[in-house]
Amino acid sequence: MKLCDAHTHYHFPSLAPCWEAVWPEARAAGVTAAVVNGTGGEDWPLVAEFVRKHSWCRAAYGIHPWQAPRRSAGWETDLRARLESDPRASVGEIGLDAWVEGHDLKDQTDLFLRQWDLAASYGRPVTVHCVGAWQELRAALKPQAPSGEGFLIHAYNGPPEWIPWFAGKGAYFSFSPYFLLDRKRPQREAFRQMPPERILLETDSPELSPPPEHNPWPLHETAGGKSLNHPANLAVALKSLASTLDREEAEMAALTTRNWQRLFGPAGLMAGDVIKAG
Ligand SMILES: [Zn+2]
């Protein structure tokens, strides 16, 4: 079974010391393609280096709303250069977050739309993060032309009744193993209302682990002991999605792989196709 991860941060330094150990397990679990999302500007070189070494992965470059106050003056020039130098790269992780301390939604919206417009001008898909700012996201997207390339709202936790509106704008939605938390049941069940051709799988690895009773690959940071979400937990997302929709896992794997390729482009290079650093 081949699985494609729509949203990861594989380049995070917390994962680096254990990467060689976790990757064979992820591959055995079926992981064959992934989008690696930058969050700031300082980490874009790490993303570029990661996808250069692991050609089965795609880069996404963007400024996460948490990093909005710390963005550099030259971020836009840098983002253009990244997109020009990598035709397979998308824009992400960008969005709106009303949960983070000291948030300024007006500034976040301005930054979000500037990145959205840049993605549109290069014909690239976008990955959106939204926490507690669904009204604002909807208002921001309202005057925007639907993106021909489509966009992903990762780990969708917005109002279920707004799914058709976002889908009409070109949205895809990714199912996270984090939804296995009891209190996330409504997020799982919202996927029953998604158009099947817009459903993807994600881990957000190394962030947002599933609860311990649903985590067959527990992983901890070498220094500090913080819990890390193993890339193989994409198989946990598949299993939970299949049971939520009352479908076979193989059918859901094929569906989400087709959807991933439609949004992010053909997954031409498969797992294990590692370009050695040189
Ligand atoms: Zn993320």
Image (tube, rainbow, N blue to C red):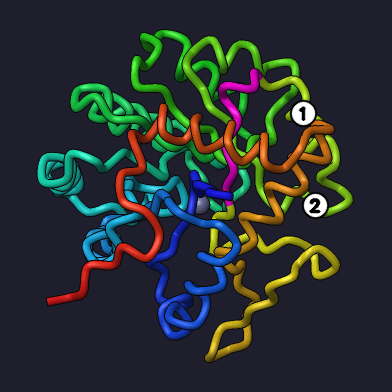
Examine the rendering and report whether any part of residue 162 can be seen: yes
196 within the magenta span: yes
Q: What number is the disc on residue 24?
A: none
Q: Which residue is mark 2?
A: 180
Residue 175 pos. (x, y %)? 65, 41
| Residue 78 placement, left or right of 274 | left
Give the distance between the C-alpha atoms of the residues marked 2 and 1, in whole angstroms.
Answer: 13 Å
Q: Quadrant of residue 194?
A: top right
Q: If the image is split into quadrants, where does the C terminus sit? A: bottom left
Tell me where the magenta segment starts and ends, as one range: 195-202
Image x and y of residue 60, in percent? 33, 46
* Marked residue nearer the N-terminal end (2 or 1): 2
Seen at 56% across and 83% down, the residue is 221
Residue name at image x 61 percent, y 27 percent: 134
Q: Nearer the viewer, residue 184 or 53?
A: 53
Residue 38, position as x, y percentages in the image: 35, 54
Frontmost residue, 269 versus 210: 269
Q: Residue at x 31, y 44 (%)?
A: 268
Residue 256 horizontal side relative to residue 143, left or right: right
Residue found farthest to the bottom: 223
Q: Is residue 211 above or below residue 39?
A: below
Viewer-side residue, 132 vs 225? 225
Q: Residues within 10 Å of mark 2 (few under 14, many from 20)?
A: many
Q: Amino acid at mark 1?
A: Ala
Amino acid under disc 2: Leu
Q: Which residue is mark 1?
A: 190
Disc 2 element: helix
Relative placement, left or right, of 145 versus 15 is: left
Residue 130: tell me if it is visible. Answer: no
